[in-house]
Image (tube, helix red, strand yellow):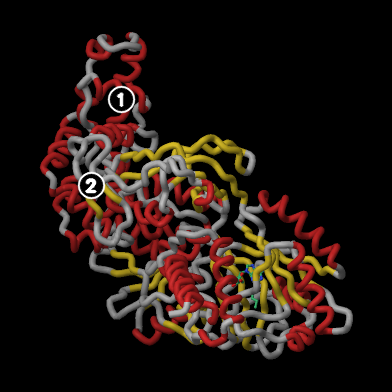
């Protein structure tokens, strides 16, 4: 094979793999900048060496996020991507090319490029009928049920003057504040963190359970209207009008009449975007007149009338000093790069996340390497590449993943389908033992007044090896240790005593069962009401509870299958911790809804949806997400979904309102 041909093939394979990691796994291993650079290299080679053309080359498509669980729908108008530029020269080229082609005055609408996941909504007769992801640009996943949970998306349009049928496209986004909250929750659960809000948004949209989607507070901004009878012949005006129908159309769009105005817009937003509630990664420039857009037309991949200018991610080069491996409460092992301190985007960076073994391998890291660190949309800076040219002959040791636990030397295991390694020695590995006690005492769990250093001291002194040991501590034990005065020892005793009043669901959360966070603990507590019943619950009984899936159920079963855990729980009960839900909640409970399956739909005034859900389970009923033959009632509020209503009518399921439901409980 010719060298050029080999090179083209290698680039195609590489880009196909990055596409898969990005769109299917939601776990990219390369920066957008690098990806675009490689894509361009391939485009240039293909343009020069036409003899190696391939209809399936990654340059001929826009990437695929198709997944098998959703129904796939063909787009009426293909969802194209935009040409990317990274410099002012390229923006100038675009502007001048457009001027030459049109040969008449034109306007450019400058907009922000939102960094989420794109969506196309179809409205008929003013109602949302379908929401489809980009997919491969030609066909996408029907994610209507999930999209309907996004509160800023109108299900029924406001105002008037909208075409009978049209599409509107925009970006589904997870605001920074939600992203931080979600990752904090995942950190507590030692689940892998989302690298950036974009991955979190696309991952969320692909969830099978709309209730999970709803809990994540996604948002959506719209920037493109398509259809036969649009209200205006200008992009800007169409979007302005779409805003009056109830869509969230950003108000930072600007109509520009010169390159100078465009550059001003770019410079302003490159600074100001840091203060926005959502992630942005560039600017989009679009010819305003739809007539002119039609004249300019399309290339195979993107419109000629629009272009994206990408902001440069802030990046620095520094030395990799060492790699350390941290073992968490659940035994998950996380690799961390220790770096020569370097200034990046206003903060000094000393450590960077390395995510997992696959990423370390791909980077081909050696100790002492000069590495590139980037802080794109990420919270934790990450290593995106190695400056191989800076490698000297005295190149350091290659970084590989460890095979035994750095703390207890137990061989690590990797669960099927997971990228992370775990230390399976949960009963003997010090950071796991200490981590469980630390989790148990946190504010949201038993709220016992000690911090990690004290846990460390108590562990080192051989006094505390699990949460139950805390309740055997005596003032005299503590006084024998360094740094303990009578007063602080007595404070701890009082705090331990108070923890005996902490409600059952927080005791359950405090056990630190994998995947049982605060919300899940509440659900389980409401459904089983006591530790004893939870301990006896079968897998089937667990998954029958609303929002408890296979993964959580299996984890709860595994926990109670372990004799050490059962002994721990027994001891905690003996020391007086609450092992069942409290009497006043029990007093509210009944069997009035026993055997009934109730679907909740719409919005309510007397109680929140979650409260209604709790009421159903507390009174022995079952809450379900979809209407079927088994549904006994639909508890309907305002704006009940039209498909649910239709189905209810077809199956003859009775629809009740809030008042009727509350009467049933009287
Ligand atoms: S217009 C045919 N406007 O960027 C033009 N896209 O690479 C359709 N995006 O898939 C896109 N902000 O997901 C447009 N203000 C904006 C945008 C935007 C973000 C995303 C969108 C699209 C990708 C283009």
The spot of residue 251 in percent (x, y) is 74, 63
Distance from mark 1 CB to nearest ligand 1 atom below 8 Å: no
Label 1, on which residue?
456
Label 2: few (<14), some (14–19) or many (≥20) C-alpha neighbours in 10 Å: some
Residue 582 appearing in the image: no
Residue extending farthest left: 563
The spot of residue 567 in percent (x, y) is 13, 37
| Ligand 1 in which quarter | bottom right
Q: Residue at x 57, y 82 (%)?
A: 49
Label 2, on which residue?
412
For residue 432, side relative to residue 58 (left or right): left
Looking at the rendered structure, the secondary structure element under dot 1 is helix
Residue 399 lies, with reference to residue 247, above or below; the image says above
Looking at the rendered structure, the secondary structure element under dot 2 is loop
- Name which of mark 1 and mark 2 comes first in the sequence: 2
Corner quadrant of residue 408: top left
The spot of residue 500 in percent (x, y) is 27, 30
In front of the other: label 1 or label 2?
2
Q: Quadrant of the C terminus?
A: bottom left
For residue 192, side relative to residue 423 (left or right): right
Q: Residue at x 80, y 64 (%)?
A: 262
- The answer to the question of whether label 1 and label 2 lie on touching residues, with beta carbons closer than 8 A, is no
The spot of residue 274 in percent (x, y) is 66, 50
Corner quadrant of residue 502: top left
Residue 364 lies, with reference to residue 480, above or below; the image says below
Q: Residue at x 58, y 61 (%)?
A: 33
Residue 460 lies, with reference to residue 177, above or below; the image says above
């Amino acid at each position: 094979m010719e060298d050029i041909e080999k090179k083209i093939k290698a680039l195609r394979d590489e880009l196909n793999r990055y596409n898969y990691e990005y769109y299917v796994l939601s776990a990219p291993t390369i920066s957008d900048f690098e990806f675009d650079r490689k894509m361009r290299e391939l485009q240039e080679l293909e343009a020069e060496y036409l003899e190696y053309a391939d209809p399936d080359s990654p340059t001929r498509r826009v990437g695929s996020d198709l997944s098998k669980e959703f129904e796939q729908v063909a787009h009426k108008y293909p969802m194209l991507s935009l040409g990317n530029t990274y410099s002012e020269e390229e923006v100038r080229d675009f502007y001048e090319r457009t001027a030459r082609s049109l040969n008449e005055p034109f306007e450019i609408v400058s907009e922000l490029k939102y960094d989420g996941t794109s969506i196309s909504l179809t409205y008929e007769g003013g109602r949302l009928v379908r929401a489809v992801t980009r997919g491969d640009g030609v066909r996408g996943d029907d994610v209507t049920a999930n999209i309907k949970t996004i509160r800023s998306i109108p299900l029924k349009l406001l105002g008037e003057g909208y075409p009978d049928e049209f599409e509107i496209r925009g970006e589904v986004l997870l605001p920074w504040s939600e992203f931080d909250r979600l990752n904090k929750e995942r950190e507590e659960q030692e689940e892998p963190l989302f690298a950036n809000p974009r991955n979190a948004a696309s991952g969320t949209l692909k969830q099978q359970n709309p209730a999970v989607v709803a809990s994540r507070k996604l948002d959506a901004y719209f920037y493109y209207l398509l259809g036969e009878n649009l209200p205006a012949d200008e992009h800007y005006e169409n979007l302005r009008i779409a805003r009056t129908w109830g869509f969230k159309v950003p108000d930072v769009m600007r109509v520009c009449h010169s390159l100078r105005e465009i550059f001003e817009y770019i410079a302003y937003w490159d600074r100001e975007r840091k203060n926005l509630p959502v992630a942005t990664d560039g600017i989009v420039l679009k010819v305003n007149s739809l007539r002119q857009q039609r004249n300019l037309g399309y290339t195979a991949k993107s419109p000629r009338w629009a272009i994206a200018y990408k902001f440069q991610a802030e990046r620095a080069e520094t030395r990799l000093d060492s790699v350390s491996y941290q073992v968490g409460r659940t035994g998950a092992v996380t690799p961390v790069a220790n770096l020569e301190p370097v200034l990046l985007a206003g903060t000094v960076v000393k450590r960077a996340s390395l995510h997992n073994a696959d990423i370390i391998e791909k980077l081909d890291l050696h100790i002492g390497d000069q590495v590139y660190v980037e802080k794109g949309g990420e919270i934790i800076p990450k290593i995106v590449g190695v400056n191989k040219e800076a490698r000297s002959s005295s190149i350091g040791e290659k970084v590989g993943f460890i095979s035994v636990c750095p703390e207890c030397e137990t061989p690590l295991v990797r669960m099927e389908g997971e990228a992370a390694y775990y230390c399976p020695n949960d009963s003997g590995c010090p950071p796991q033992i200490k981590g469980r006690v630390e989790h148990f005492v946190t504010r949201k769990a038993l709220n016992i007044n000690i911090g990690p250093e004290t846990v460390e001291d108590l562990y080192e002194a051989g006094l505390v090896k699990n949460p139950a040991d805390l309740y055997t501590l005596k003032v005299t034990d503590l006084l024998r240790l360094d740094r303990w005065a009578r007063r602080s020892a007595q404070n701890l005793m009082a705090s331990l005593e108070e923890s005996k009043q902490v409600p059952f669901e927080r005791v359950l959360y405090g056990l630190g069962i994998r995947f049982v966070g605060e919300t899940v603990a509440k659900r389980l507590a409401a459904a089983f009401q006591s530790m004893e019943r939870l301990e006896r619950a079968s897998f089937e009984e667990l998954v029958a509870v609303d929002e408890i899936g296979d993964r959580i159920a299996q984890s709860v079963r595994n926990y109670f299958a372990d004799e050490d855990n059962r002994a721990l729980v027994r001891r905690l009960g003996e020391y007086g911790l609450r092992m069942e839900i409290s009497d006043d909640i029990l007093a509210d409970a009944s069997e009035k809804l026993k055997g009934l399956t109730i679907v909740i739909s719409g919005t309510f005034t007397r109680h929140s949806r979650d409260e209604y859900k709790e009421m159903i389970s507390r009174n022995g009923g079952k809450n379900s997400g979809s209407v079927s033959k088994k549904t006994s009632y639909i508890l309907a509020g305002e704006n009940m979904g039209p498909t649910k209503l239709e189905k209810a009518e077809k199956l003859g399921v009775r629809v009740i309102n809030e008042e009727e439901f509350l009467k049933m409980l009287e």
